[in-house]
Image: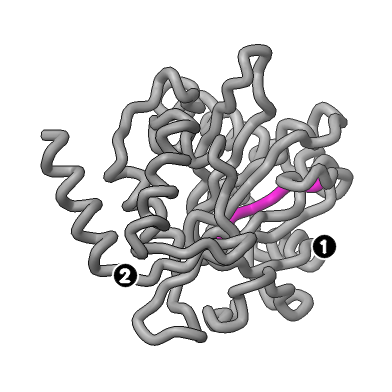
Amino acid sequence: MPTAHRRQMHTKAALLPEHSGSLSSVACLGGLMREDRDDAAKACRFISYAAGDIVGGPGAGETSVAFVTHGAVRVSLPPDRHGDVAFFDVTDGGVFGHLEALTGETPKLSAVALSSAEVSFLPASAFCMLIEAHPVIALELMRAHARDTMTQAPRTPGEASGSSHMLYAELLRMAEADSKMDDGLLISRLPRHRELADWTGLSEAEVAASLASLVKSGCVERRYPGLCILDAEKLRTLASTAATSQK
């Protein structure tokens, strides 16, 4: 699969050339013959994302299944009755949106790329037909679900733990080089305070206060819908200092 250059990814995802992708890294499809995987790939569309980009497909209500073929994506579930949002991370070879596809429901997920990522989207109807033809896929999905239930269940804010250094580290991880500024970093689309709070174990108020403090100190600048990191070295120092103080 062609590698997308970061400079192309500041503002939007890149649709890769038709049939340019491969599903060879997708764990649940590992039991298929190469020819069968290639046939499935022909029914997919492959999109490349930069860190911080909103991921489409089932992450935008589309009735499709997403295979993460490179990178990492964070998927958030709808808020529960208390307003809490659970989330889980999908990395190389993982899948999301399959449960909704199998039940015939419209996905109510939201997803954001944690790093540069490549995701392939297969229509839900095609995915269901694939499973009917190859039951081994269902077995692999059940095994993965069992492992996740035991070791990697979605976390909620009440179960997470963290402090300001986790927010600083998260900002640095989402950022990429800013083509408009030497040594500057840019987060093209900053997640909502609610999402940042869920990911770092902070409250929304703490996230807002921390971001406001960074802006006031001149370390960062809001560039809607994103965030420009003006002094990356200072932010790294803050992240390191805050982490040390928590030990």
Q: Main secondary structure of the magenta part?
A: strand
Residue 24 in sight in this render: no
Q: What is the crowding at mark 1: few (fewer than 14 residues within 10 Å), some, or many (at least 20)?
A: some
Where residue 66 appears, as percent x and y from the top left, is: 69, 50
Q: Secondary structure at mark 1?
A: loop
Which is nearer the eye, 212 or 155?
212
Q: Which mark is residue 135?
A: none
Q: Mark 2 or mark 1: which comes first in sequence? A: 1
Q: Is residue 46 above or below residue 2?
A: above
Q: Residue at x 41, y 63 (%)?
A: 220
Q: If the image is split into quadrants, where does the C terminus sit?
A: top left
* 184 relative to 88 in the view: left or right: left
**In-front residue for pair 242/101:** 242
Left or right of 188 on screen, residue 200: left
Identify which amino acid the numbered label 2 is placed on. Answer: Asp
**For numbered disc 2, what is the local secondary structure?**
loop
Please tell me which residue is depicted at 24% across the width and 60% down the height of the picture: 236
Q: Residue furthest front?
A: 216
Front: mark 2 or 1? 2
Question: What is the crowding at mark 2: few (fewer than 14 residues within 10 Å), some, or many (at least 20)?
Answer: some
Disc 1: which residue: 43
Q: Position of residue 219 (x, y in %)?
A: 34, 63
182 within the magenta span: no
User: Which quadrant of the structure image shows residue 214?
Assistant: bottom left
Q: Residue at x 41, y 67 (%)?
A: 229
Mark 2 touches mark 1? (CB < 8 Å): no
Q: Position of residue 5 (x, y in %)?
A: 54, 83
> Which stretch is magenta?
64-70
Q: Which dot marks residue 231?
A: 2
Q: In the displayed structure, would residue 151 be above or below residue 19?
A: above
